[in-house]
Amino acid sequence: MQRADINLSDLDFWARPIAEREEAFGLLRADPELAFFDPPAAAIDAGRGYYALTRHADVIEASRQPQLFCSGRGTDMVDMPPWMLDFFGSMINMDDPRHVRMRRIVSRAFTPKMLASMQADVDQIAVGVVDDIAERGECDFVADVAARLPLRIIVDLMGIPRSQEQFIFDRTNVILGFSDVEYVPEQDMGSILTALVGAGNDLATLVRDLADERMRDPGDDLLSALVTAEVDGDHLSAEEMASFFILLVVAGNETTRNAIAHGLHALTEHPDQRARWQADFEALAPTAVEEIVRWATPVIHFRRTVTTDGARIGDHELTEGDKVVLFYNSANRDEARFDEPFGFHVARTPNEHVGFGGPGPHYCLGAHLARREITVAFRELFARLPDIHSVEQPDRLRSGFINGIKHLRAEFTPAAVSR
Ligand code: HEM
């Protein structure tokens, strides 16, 4: 493969076999120059192209200097009009002071205490999800387990009726899976935009209605905490609530599900590592979960925009308005940072992966919850269906943004339902 064969903006690149993609990123990491790519084709004016940051050190450097590498001008490869940045990205597309205000308000409703209080519920949800497949001996691991668990947790956490689960699942699939025909059958730019806006509006309407109810009659759920949260006399507006909700359900569903699905497949393909974890689950869970997130890297990239002439990445001087795209997948396979980056090791230490983003103000707000979900999923699976394994190669999402698995057939010895 030659450097000239690589185009990270081309969706077809992301449909190439994993080995070819990894070879391409290996070439980019080894190249002392920063690779520049034209923007992907888009229904809107995509703006200029971008430099690809593929080395771990470069991703860290950009992440930890938000004043030089900002998020407020967009975090997608393509530029978006301001209303779309807020509507689909919420705080992910904000800089201080807007970002810190928003993060302060929502963090109040997202504290470790709040999460600890729902541990028993998370465990119960995992029991229920496994119950639903236990007697069958086989399943579509994504639809039946990996997607169901985080979806149910976020729905319960927010205080949304479970009857809305499928409705939310279908909309989040469109928002992050819009480049795949399974979710948006017509792949022309107009149809994609219509589908995206329609899915976003559906979710916004749902949350506005529920928020109105909670305002009148607050409960002990996250939505009530959000509508009543106050920092220095400040509340979230109805629009801010709606777009934060979209971010939360999308970020909370489409990421953890892929970590869990990639996790089962990696454990199937590395039986020695699986046996090791199963023999000592609790002791190895913290490192195994981090390794699953590194291995899967469910979010492939986010972008930053250079705010000041002379900002640097390594030896490269950039100018105001330049875009840099942080390829977390590549950073997480960087041989300069990880021993055996292509090996899957449940006890890997240290493991400074950037699966939840680099260090900085936008580091994943849901990281603790995601770690807990992945742990609970495998604890319950190993306890009840200890021989569950994938039986085919993953059916992958066509996307350069989400490292998604749409379907993954799995088999196991049937077990009794617990209820
Ligand atoms: C394995 C699962 C997950 C992965 C791989 C992941 C990945 C990421 C990444 C890479 C970012 C950084 C964005 C940036 O730097 O611009 C991020 C931010 C964020 N994530 Fe996650 N995430 C996961 C689970 C979750 C969950 C479960 C939730 C909530 C329920 C969540 C909510 C958020 C939010 C709200 C932000 C924005 C934070 C900010 O801008 O201050 N994530 N996530």
Image: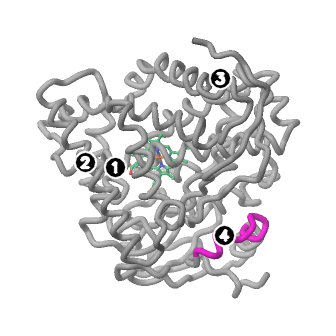
Residue at the disc numbered 4: 15
Where is residue 289 drawn, in percent x and y? 65, 36
Q: Which residues are magenta?
A: 11-21
Marks 1 and 2, Cα distance to the nearest angstrom? 6 Å
Q: Is 20 inside the magenta-drawn segment? A: yes
Where is residue 258 drawn, in percent x and y? 60, 47
Marks 2 and 4, Cα distance to the nearest angstrom? 33 Å
Marks 1 and 3, Cα distance to the nearest angstrom? 29 Å
Q: Which mark is residue 242?
A: 2
Mark 1 element type: helix
Q: Is residue 46 above or below residue 142?
A: below
State which tag comes first along the sequence, 2 or 3.
2
Quadrant in the picture for the N terminus: bottom right
Q: Is residue 27 left or right of residue 67?
A: right
Amino acid under label 4? Ala
Marks 4 and 1, Cα distance to the nearest angstrom? 27 Å
x 72%, y 55%: residue: 337
Quadrant in the picture for the C terminus: top right
Q: Magenta part mainly helix, strand or loop?
A: helix
Amino acid under label 1? Ile
State which tag comes first along the sequence, 4 or 1.
4
Residue at the disc numbered 1: 246
Residue at the disc numbered 3: 380
